[in-house]
């Protein structure tokens, strides 16, 4: 291995930061050996904070109607072949009840941008989940909404929000999205979510069309600056009914390499080994954990709708019942020496002070007693 690469890895492990051109070099010059060294440091950093625990979140895909037309996404509005559905409030609540009995203590409600799920409808659902399961966190992943909407959802009890930034390069963002969507608004939403006291997750696809080591280096600098509580990364996988149908997918190898880098940039970060990673390789999620991830998000959606929430081709885990998904992931984690825990799974800040400052910014204050 090149000496300069070893010193970059050591610098990153020690100072949690590299220059833009250094990230680029680390990515461009990567080898199996440098990936191994990086993963070793990443696993060590994670182990100091989380031991061998893997947090889990129950994902409930509440609907696939979407007003947006992201060029990569299988549920984009222009995809006439996509069979649309919405879960009813009762169905969502019963998914959460089932998840609770399986040991989930965080529910992620994800869906397309759909006016049907208005603030009124969502606030009602959030309040009911929190009333039924006061020891659980509710995470939302419903795309871009107004500040007032984020505020109302937060006041109704939502604790966390996942909104992948998709790419930290404005020019790249514009090649992945239609003209009516804007990079500035995506970033503004992330800032607003944070100002409202949500735990915030950003993230990006690995190997999305037009992405090079330069764009990835920008994503890494953004993560350094923003310090998200969570970061969702997974390989881009083409969907047959989108303009990117013929593009090559992202790789397992580069995704794992980036998971290790992100762990070292911000050791306490919550980093899922995503379903997309499990889709490009059978043992993708295990390898993601071994590279530095510490979260898995099995599907709790009713089996009848799973195939319809198809963001990309051949998505895994669309045929199994929730209990099977949970059992399968538990066995997979055990096979590599990790343990899925029944825990709300909040980020563990490095010093009590850092956590305290963030708590003070939260509205309502309800999160404190449950999460810390
Ligand atoms: N509407 C919500 C949820 C989007 S789906 C929102 O805007 O946040 C969640 C994530 O799936 C997206 O943020 C995107 O990064 C990812 N995704 C979409 N299409 C994909 C594809 N073809 N391959 C891999 N990931 C994809």
Image (tube, grey):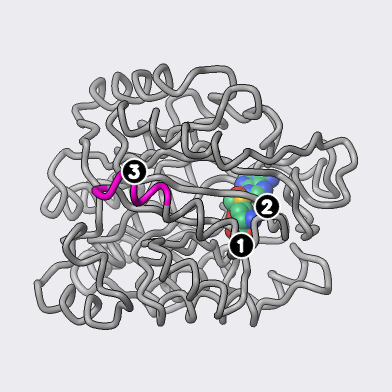
Q: Does ligand 1 reach within 8 Å of label 2's beta carbon?
A: yes
Q: Which residue is located at x 22 percent, y 36 percent?
A: 342
Mark 3 surroundings within 10 Å by alpha-carbon count, few (fewer than 14), some (14 through 19), many (20 or more) = some
Q: Which residue is located at x 26 percent, y 67 percent?
A: 366
Q: Gap between marks 2 and 3, in whole Å?
A: 25 Å
Q: Position of residue 239 (x, y in %)?
A: 76, 39
**Residue on which the image places disc 2:** 112
Camera-side residue of 154 and 183: 154
Q: Nearer the viewer, mark 3 or mark 1?
A: 3
Quarter occupied by residue 64: top right
Q: Position of residue 258 (x, y in %)?
A: 43, 54
Of pointers 3 and 1, the one earlier in the residue sequence: 3
Reply yes or no: does residue 213 show up in magenta. no
Label 2's element? loop
Q: Which residue is located at x 56 percent, y 63 percent?
A: 213
Label 3's element? helix
Q: Is residue 361 visible?
A: yes
Q: Is residue 24 visible?
A: no
Quarter of the figure that contains the C terminus: bottom left
Task: Please say if 102 is above or below 127.
Answer: above
Mark 2 surroundings within 10 Å by alpha-carbon count, few (fewer than 14), some (14 through 19), many (20 or more) = many
Of pointers 2 and 3, the one earlier in the residue sequence: 2
Horizontally, is 260 left or right of 117 in the view?
A: left
Camera-side residue of 244 and 15: 244
**Residue on which the image places disc 3:** 132
> Pointers 2 and 3 in contact (CB under 8 A)?
no
**Residue on which the image places disc 1:** 143
Q: Does ligand 1 reach within 8 Å of label 1's beta carbon?
A: yes
For the magenta stretch, what is the residue range?
Answer: 128-135
Q: Position of residue 320 (x, y in %)?
A: 52, 17
Reply yes or no: does residue 132 show up in magenta. yes
């Amino acid at each position: 291995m090149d000496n300069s690469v070893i010193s970059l890895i050591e610098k990153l492990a020690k100072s949690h930061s590299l220059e833009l051109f250094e990230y680029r070099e680390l990515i461009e010059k990567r080898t199996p050996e440098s990936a191994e060294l990086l993963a070793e440091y990443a696993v060590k950093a994670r182990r100091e904070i989380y031991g061998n625990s893997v947090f889990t979140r129950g994902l409930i895909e509440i609907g696939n109607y979407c007003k947006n037309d992201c060029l990569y996404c299988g549920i984009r509005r222009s995809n006439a072949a996509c069979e649309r559905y919405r879960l009813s409030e009762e169905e969502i609540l019963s998914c959460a009840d089932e998840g609770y009995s399986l040991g989930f203590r965080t529910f992620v409600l994800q869906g397309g941008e759909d006016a049907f799920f208005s603030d009124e409808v969502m606030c009602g659902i959030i309040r009911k989940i929190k009333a039924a399961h006061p020891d659980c966190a509710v995470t939302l992943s419903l795309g871009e909404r107004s500040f007032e909407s984020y505020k109302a959802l937060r006041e109704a009890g939502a604790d966390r929000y996942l909104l992948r930034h998709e790419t930290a390069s404005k020019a790249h963002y514009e090649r992945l999205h239609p003209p009516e969507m804007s990079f500035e608004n995506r970033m503004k939403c992330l800032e607003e979510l944070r100002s409202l006291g949500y735990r915030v997750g950003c993230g990006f696809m690995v190997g999305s069309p037009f992405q090079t080591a330069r764009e990835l280096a920008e994503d890494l600098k953004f993560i350094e600056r923003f310090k998200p509580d969570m970061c969702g990364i997974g390989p881009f996988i083409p969907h047959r009914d989108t303009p990117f149908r013929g593009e090559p997918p992202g790789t397992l190898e580069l995704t794992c390499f980036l998971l290790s880098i992100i762990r070292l940039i911000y050791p306490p970060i919550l980093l899922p080994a995503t379903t997309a990673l499990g889709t490009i390789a059978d043992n993708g999620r295990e390898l993601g954990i071994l590279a530095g991830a510490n979260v898995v998000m099995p599907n709790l959606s009713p089996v009848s709708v799973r195939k319809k929430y198809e963001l990309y081709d051949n998505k895994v885990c669309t045929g199994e019942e929730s209990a099977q998904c949970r059992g399968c992931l538990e066995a997979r984690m055990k096979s590599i020496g990790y343990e899925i825990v029944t825990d709300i799974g909040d980020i563990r800040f490095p010093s009590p002070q850092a956590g305290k400052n963030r708590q003070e910014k939260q509205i309502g204050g309800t999160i404190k007693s449950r999460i810390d």
